[in-house]
Image: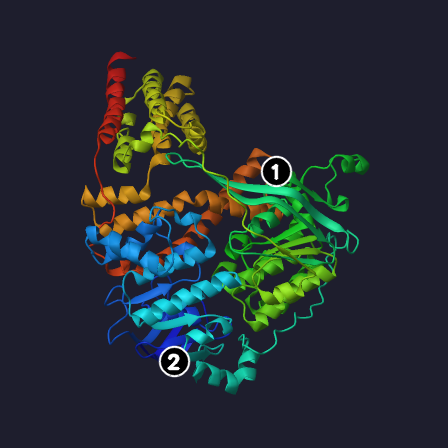
Amino acid sequence: MHVENLTWRPFGRSRPVLDRLDLTVGPGERVLLAGPSGSGKSTLLRAVAGLLLTADSGELSGEVTVGGAAPQAVPGSVGLVLQDPGAGVVASTIGRDVAFGLENVQVPAPDMPTRVRAVLDEVGLTMSPQSSPATLSGGESQRLALAGALVMEPSVLLLDEPTAMLDADTAAGVRAVVAEVVARRGLTLVVVEHRLDGWLDHVDRLVVLDAAGRVVADGDPRQVLADHADSLAAQGIWVPGVPDPEPLDIALVPARGGAAGRVADGQVVAAAIDVRVEHTTRRLGEPSRSTVAVDGADLDARAGRTVALVGPSGAGKSSLMSALGGLVAPTGGTVELALPLTPAESGDHGAARDRVAPPHEWASTHLARAVAWVPQRAATSIIGRTVRDDVLTTPLALGHDREAAGRRADALLSALGLAHLAAVDPRQLSGGEQRRLAMASAVAHGPALVLADEPTVGQDRLTWAAVAGVLAAARDEGAAVVVTTHDPGVVDDADRVVGLEAPTQPSPEPEPERRPLLARVGSLALLATALCVLPLPGLLDTWRQGLAVLGVEVMLGLVGLLAPGRGRAPQGRLQGVLRRLAPAALAVLGVAWSAWLLGGRDLEVAAGAALRVLCLLVPSAVVVGFLDPEQLGDHLAQRLGLPARPVVAATAALQRVQAFDTLWAELMTTRRVRSTRADRGPVARGREAVVVTGGLLVGALGQATTLALAMDARGFAGATRRTWAGPAPWRLPDTLALTAGLLVVVAAVAARLTLP
C-alpha cells in the first residue's frame, strides 16, 4: 500500500484535510493510525479504499496504489469497515448482506452459502444467516461489517473506529477477532482509533497525523509513545499512561428564564419508577416483533448531580433515559418530573399540581423548557441554517432575550471549538463537530434535565475536555445530568453510576402469525398488479364508473389482506393501508377542488375526478406494504434482465425508505424537545410536516452517502455484471395476483360500457 503526495481539499473548505501526505505500508503490517479530531484519518482510509470521490466532492491530487494497482482495480482487494456499521447494511438478512460482495464479483450462487457461513463462523456470528441485521447488538453489528469485508478475501483491511460505540468487554472481543483473522490470513491492517491502549498489543506500527493532515510520528508504537507522549497528548491524542484531562472549566452566561436551578440542589428533578419500555416493529407481510428494552427499572436524577448509565450494548440505556425525559411513552410504570417544572393545566397553579400529566404527554414548549437531549445520531438534532442559529433555536422559541441568549451561545461555541464555524451550515460539519454542536444546542436555554446519549464518542482529548466541561457546567448551574456512556472518564466524573443489564426477552408466541395472502405473492407480481391500474384515468368518465371500479378494488384488496390458516391473526393490516392512504387524501381533495372550480362547479365532475385518482392510489396503498425490495431486485434482474447497477441502487434506496418511519420519529422528537413542534392547529402541523419532510430528505441523503461508500467498498463500483444470491421464482400466487389486477381493468371497461 503506497500513498504519495496525497492532497484532498473538500469543496467549501479553504484548507486541505490532507496535505501532501506520503505513507507506505508493507504487506502484512499492522498499523494504528492516530491523530486529533479533524486530522483526516477517516479521509485517508477512504482514499486507500479508492472511495474518496464516491460520496464527496473536492480537489484531489497525488497517487494511491495497493499492490501496485489502483485500489478499485481489483474489487474486494481492500476491505473497509466504516464508523457506523449499521449504516452500511445493504440487505434484510445477515447472510444476504455478507453475500453482497460475492454477488458483485460474480461468484456463482451455489458457492455463496458455504463461503458466507464460513466467514460468519470466523467472526463469531453463530445465528442463522436468515436473521435480520436489526436484531444484532453493537458488537454483533461490527462483526457483521467485518464479515462483509472479509468474505471478498482482501489483502488490506481498513477499520474506522471499530470499537468507539462499544462497551469494554464487547470492544475487547471485537479486537480479539480482528487480531485472530488478520494473523490467520496475513492481512495488512490499518485501524483508526482515538484511544490507543486497546490496540497497542495488536499492531506493530503507529502513525500519527497532526491537525493539518501531515504525518508527525511514525514507528514502533511504544517507541513513538515514549519519544512523543507529551506532544501527542497536547495535540489531543489519547496517549496511554498520560492522565485523562480534567473537564474544561466553563463559566456559562446565565440563561434568563432557564429551568436549571428551579429545583433545590440535591432534590429529585425526574424519577422513573418500575418503568418498562417495549419497541414493536410491525410491517405488513411480516410477523410483528416486540423487543423489551427496559423492564422494571427505577432511576432518579437530582439537581446538581450527574448520573452515568452504563452497561453492555442492548441493555436499554438510551430507552430508559428517553423515558425519564418524556421523549417516549413507557409501556409500564410511571415517570414524574418535579412539581416546579410541570406545566400549569389551568390558571390555578395549585390545581395543576394536584393533577399532573406524565411528561410524554406535555406540549413541546413545556417539555423543551425543562428537558434537553443530545442524541446518539447528532445529525438528527440539527434544526438551524447555521451553527449559531442552531444553538439559538430553543432559547428564542422559548422567548428568551435574544442578546443574552446570543452571549451564552457564543460562549458555548467558543468552549467547544466551534466559534470559527458559527456561520457554517451545520450539515457540513464532521461527525465529532456535529456531536459538540448538539451539546451546545441542548444546554443553551438552561434546562433542568440534560439527557446526553454517548456525548463523548469520536472526541479527542481536547474536545473531550470541552464536552465534559459543558456537562459539568450544566450540572453546576443546577441541572440534573443523565449520561449514557462507555467512557471511563465520564463515569469517573459522575456523582452516581447506574449499571443496566439487557432484560430478558419474552418467549416466542406458541403459535406463529398467519401470513396474509398478499404476503405470499412475489414482489414483481405485486408491482405489476399495482401498475395494471394505470389505464384507468382514460377508461373512466363518470363518478358512477369510478365508484364501481373502486368497489372492485376494495373487494379484491380485502381478499388479499385475508390470512387463512392456523396461527395468530396478523395485526395492523387494514390500519396500515389506511395510514398509507391518509397523505393521498390531500391529493384527492386537491383534484376534486380543482375539478369543481374548473368544471363549472359541478359536483359530479368533481366526484368523477376524485374517484379516478383514488382508483389509481388504492391498489398501491394495499400492495406496497408487502413489497420486499431485495426480492424485487432479484426478480427485476433475473426475470426481466434489467441492468444490475440501477436495480441494486433502486432496491437499496427502497430498503432505506422502509426505515423512514424511524428517521421521521427521531426528527419529530428533536423538534419536540427543541420547542419547535407544532402541537395544535392543522395549518401549523401541515407546515411542520413540510419542514420535517425536508429534514427527512436531507437525512436520507446523508444515509445514502454512507450506504454508497459501504456498497462501493464491496465491489459495487465496478459491478456492471453480477450474480444473485437469491432465487427469483414465479409461483401460482403471483399469477393470481396479476389476474386480480387485470380484473380491475376489465371492471373499468365493463363500467364504461354499462354505466352512464
Numbered label attached to residue 490: none
In this view, the residue in front, 156 or 600, is: 156
Position of residue 500 in the picture relative to residue 145 (left or right)? right
Q: Residue at 52% x, 63% y: name it.
A: 168
Rendered location of residue 84, percent (x, y): 44, 59
Task: Give the amino acid type for the residue marked by disc 1 in the picture.
Answer: Gly
Position of residue 621 in the picture relative to residue 441 (left or right)? left
Is 121 placed above or below 187 here?
above
Image-quadrant location for residue 221: bottom left
Per the image, label 1 sits on a secondary structure element best described as strand
Residue 392 in view: no
Task: Give the amino acid type for the residue marked by disc 2 in the picture.
Answer: Arg
Rendered location of residue 698, percent (x, y): 45, 52
In this view, the residue in front, 373 or 548, is: 373
In this view, the residue in front, 689 or 646, is: 646
Rendered location of residue 279, percent (x, y): 51, 41
Q: Residue at 35% x, 65% y: name it.
A: 80
Numbered label attached to residue 20: 2
Q: Residue at 30% x, 69% y: name it.
A: 185
Per the image, label 2 sits on a secondary structure element best described as strand
Rendered location of residue 338, percent (x, y): 74, 46
Is 648 placed above or below 64 here?
above
Q: Residue at 28% x, 28% y: name it.
A: 533
Q: Crowding near pointer 2: few (<14 within 10 Å), some, many (20+)?
A: some
Numbered marks: total: 2
Residue holding disc 1: 332
Quadrant of the drawing holding the N terminus: bottom left
Quadrant of the drawing holding the C terminus: top left
Badge nearest the viewer, 2 or 1: 1
Question: Which residue is at the far bottom?
Answer: 227
